[in-house]
Image (tube, rainbow, N blue to C red):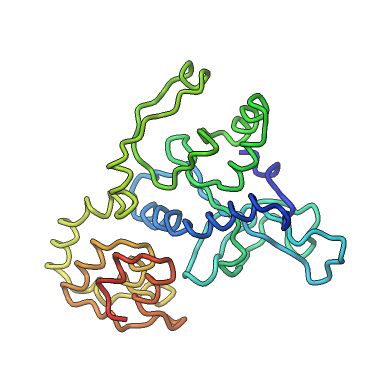
Amino acid sequence: MGLEENIALSQGNDPEMLAATKQARKTFKYFWRELSWERRRIIPGLDFAAVKIGFSDADMGPDDPEAEHMWVSDIECNGREIRGILNNDPEWVTSVKAGDPICEPMSALSDWIYAINGRAYGGFTVNLIRGRMPASERRAHDQAWGMEFGDPEAIEVVYVPTEPVGFLGRLFGKQPVIDPEERKQNMIEHPMCVNMEESLREALQQSKEMLTATDDEGWTMLHRDALAGNATVVKLLLEHGADPTLKTPEGDTPYTLAKRFGWKHVMKLLPN
């Protein structure tokens, strides 16, 4: 993966780049939802997952760039901050280096990407740069990343199974066909969430422990699934007696967590 070649200095006067960053922040919730389900999978489904964060030094001069944007993996998120491990050695910033643990506010996010079956999802700033490349340079770029990005002007944010187009199809620019109805449903609720409804109901009927158990950070299952936008899970937990007034150590209720990422269909299930 050519991540070391994908470091960028901020371009505060580039309206298209600012718009791409804004869209990445708006849709980050889908990245986080996918990552939350990845942690429940017995067999990993993601080929790759990382976010791009803007870093700057306190002593930057007037002629220095505003920020250096670099990729971070092993992502954790509480809706307020992003934590992870920096993948890149900076070219300009001196306060961090590759391998450092980082913790930055959500406002520092500039992009996100995850990949399933070799297909990239997200990558708003990456696709903006790809769209400005000649076709041959774009192919080399994609080969360096080791994944298929598709049309730079048709960015997908949720995984929907498609039929492979094959080598000749890619050679002639053929794009995989995505069922618009399935995409619409997956935007609302992750298919794994729908598929686990019955097994979760049975588990809750047999044991109430998961309703009150907290993880190492003091979060309940209801907190986690509210932040991830999993309405089916949230509804079942509430039906079986989960307390929606409990707060995380940071002071967030399930409602405020759902609101932080704009999961309106989850917010409707919870008291505010």
Q: Which of the image's four quarters has the N terminus? A: top right
Q: Nearer the viewer, residue 208 or 187?
A: 187
Q: Residue furthest front?
A: 15
Q: Position of residue 197 (x, y in %)?
A: 19, 57
What residue is drawn where x is 23% and y is 76%? 242
Q: Quadrant of residue 61?
A: bottom right
Q: Is residue 43 above or below residue 178?
A: below
Q: Position of residue 107 (x, y in %)?
A: 59, 67
* Quadrant of the drawing holding the C terminus: bottom left
Image check: 98 left or right of 104? right
Q: Quadrant of residue 6?
A: top right
- Residue 113 higher or lower than 97, as above or below: above
38 relative position to 141: left or right: left
Residue 155 percent location from the top left of the image: 48, 42
Give residue 251's position: percent from left, percent from top. Answer: 43, 83
Q: Nearer the viewer, residue 142 or 222?
A: 142
**Residue shown at the point (36%, 54%) measured from the top left:** 37
Residue at x-position 48% and y-position 18%: 167
